[in-house]
Amino acid sequence: MQEVYDFLKKHGTFYLATEDGDRPRIRPFSNIDIFEGRLYIQTGKVKEVSKQLFANPKVELCLCVGDEWLRVEATAVNDDSQVAKQHMIDANPLLKDWFKADDDNTHVLYLSEATATFSSLFGEPKVLRF
């Protein structure tokens, strides 16, 4: 999991895919955190992506850099604890302008049953599970 976090954090923006009814939805994300041995993402509960995650928690993250890419399939699990929310905000300082751990909007989720695949144009894929 640390290798996945380091790759995502190093390169900044990754893309998150969700489902909206019978349509896929993909959007850029950048907020990521490791807390209590879990990989977390964050959004606002007022956003459509949050509603999609509550309806269907199956997600995929993707990031491509040069001839390397990472795909992570997982189930996003809601964590409503203030301590998880505060940890995410502290780890991603830009969030402090828009979110508070005790507001009703901050939505943090950890990735469960995750399969991460590092691939490149050269060599065999590397698969990690966490």
Image: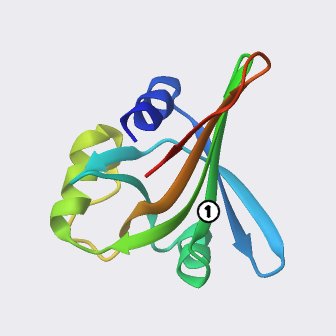
As drawn, the residue found furthest toward the front would be 124
Residue 60 in which image quadrant? bottom right
The residue located at (73%, 18%) in the rendering is 123
Quadrant of the drawing holding the N terminus: top left
The residue located at (49%, 67%) in the rendering is 76
Q: Secondary structure at mark 1?
A: strand
Residue 69 x/y as whole percent: 68, 30
How many numbered marks, from 0 up? 1
The residue located at (35%, 40%) in the rendering is 94
As drawn, the residue found furthest toward the right would be 22
Left or right relative to 46: residue 6: left
Residue 2 x/y as whole percent: 36, 35
Residue 111 x/y as whole percent: 45, 59
Q: Is residue 68 above or below residue 40?
A: above
Residue 125 in which image quadrant? top right
Mark 1 Cα shell of 10 Å, populated few (<14), some (14-19), many (≥20): some
Q: List the residue tagged with mark 1.
A: 59
Left or right relative to 81: residue 128: right
Residue 90 x/y as whole percent: 21, 44
Residue 41 in which image quadrant? bottom left
Which one is in front, 59 or 128?
Answer: 128
